[in-house]
Image (cartoon, helix red, strand yellow):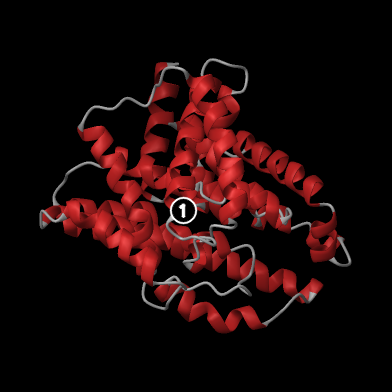
Amino acid sequence: MDIAKGILIIMVMFAHSCAPENYVAKISSILAVFMLISGYLYKDEMVLVKLKKLFLNILIPFYFMSTVGYFVYYFINRFVSISDSVFSSIFDFLFFGYSPIDMPVNVLPLWYLYMFFVAELCFLVLYKLKLVHLIPVLSFFSTLFIKEQSKFFKLEVVFHGLVWFYLGFIFKKNRFGFRIKRKYLLFSFSFLLLWIFSNINGFNDWRSASYGKFSLLSYFTEFLSIILIVSLSNILVSTRFENFFVLFGRFTIFVLGYHILIPGLLTPLVSDPIAFVSRFWYIYYLVSIFIMYLVLKIFPKWLIYTLAGQFHLIRGNMTFIKKYKRRS
């Protein structure tokens, strides 16, 4: 699963690299896979315990990295003068998860953390009320009748995506393993179909509750993305690339929050950074991956957790280090 999450976050970086939209459209259904994995890992716990974990693991990182992102964007904007209009939407972003297109690019990806917090909270409520099997119905109606994002806690995309969380939960309940057979065949098959049907349906943008030309077809492309990522992660097991993807997979929240912000620190060196990135997006993408890889390799875990707002993990990591030194 760490390999799968690593593949996913690197594909997210590609989607945010200013690559041509027809390329990005091919992978725009991958957020469904994050939902599936999270549903697969879901544990039935007391409500207060689950709420505490959601706040510590999701909501606090969202607010912390958003604050850092806005501050850095404001600082960079003093040198580059991109736009000041984005600061008029801070309230909507932090309280409703509403992210208009003119949001600063270094905090825009964090809308997913907000949405995911609301999604798991909804799943928790439905599960405790024993109404969890209504999720496919809610997803269908949300997808069919809500055509744009609203300033209402991202519920429109929550109910669309929650069906994959539900599917992951059902897979785990029925002891479906993450390891699969015929991985090369499934990868080739899903890759071909995803290429064809993503061309037909177009861009699948969860952020704005837009699921392509044919909204119900998005379910099919999202399911193909799940098969693609799961089969590819199985292919990469025990290869020379495994550790690379595992590294990104174990720190997905940090990478999500900083994969634009950290490379963006170099923008004052370019006279027109937006035009430069748009023209040389492939160079920007490779440089971003290289920079984030170096950061993940060089930065100690406690610093990564701190920057990601995952403060509850710092104490456990420091305790582990102390025990390791004593044994040494």
Q: Considering only vertical position in the picture, is 236 above or below 9?
A: above
Residue 244 in sight in this render: yes
Q: Out of 206 and 281, give the one closest to the viewer.
A: 206
Q: Considering only vertical position in the picture, is 202 above or below 230?
A: below
Q: Out of 30 and 2, give the one closest to the viewer.
A: 30
**Displayed quadrant of residue 275:** bottom right
Q: Position of residue 276 (x, y in %)?
A: 85, 59
Q: How many marks?
A: 1
Q: Amino acid at mark 1?
A: Leu
Q: Position of residue 47 (x, y in %)?
A: 15, 55
Instruction: Give the residue furthest to the left.
Output: 129
Residue occupying the point 62% across, 50% down: 199
Left or right, 224 with reference to 176:
right
Q: Position of residue 48 (x, y in %)?
A: 17, 56
Left or right, 80 with reference to 52:
right
User: In the rendered image, which quarter contains the C terminus?
Assistant: top left
User: In the rendered image, which quarter contains the N terminus?
Assistant: top left
Q: Position of residue 155 (x, y in %)?
A: 35, 68
Residue occupying the point 84% across, 52% down: 280
Left or right, 280 with reference to 95:
right
Residue occupying the point 57% across, 31% down: 245
Q: Residue at label 1?
A: 217
Q: Considering only vertical position in the picture, is 185 above or below 130?
A: above
Q: Secondary structure at mark 1?
A: helix
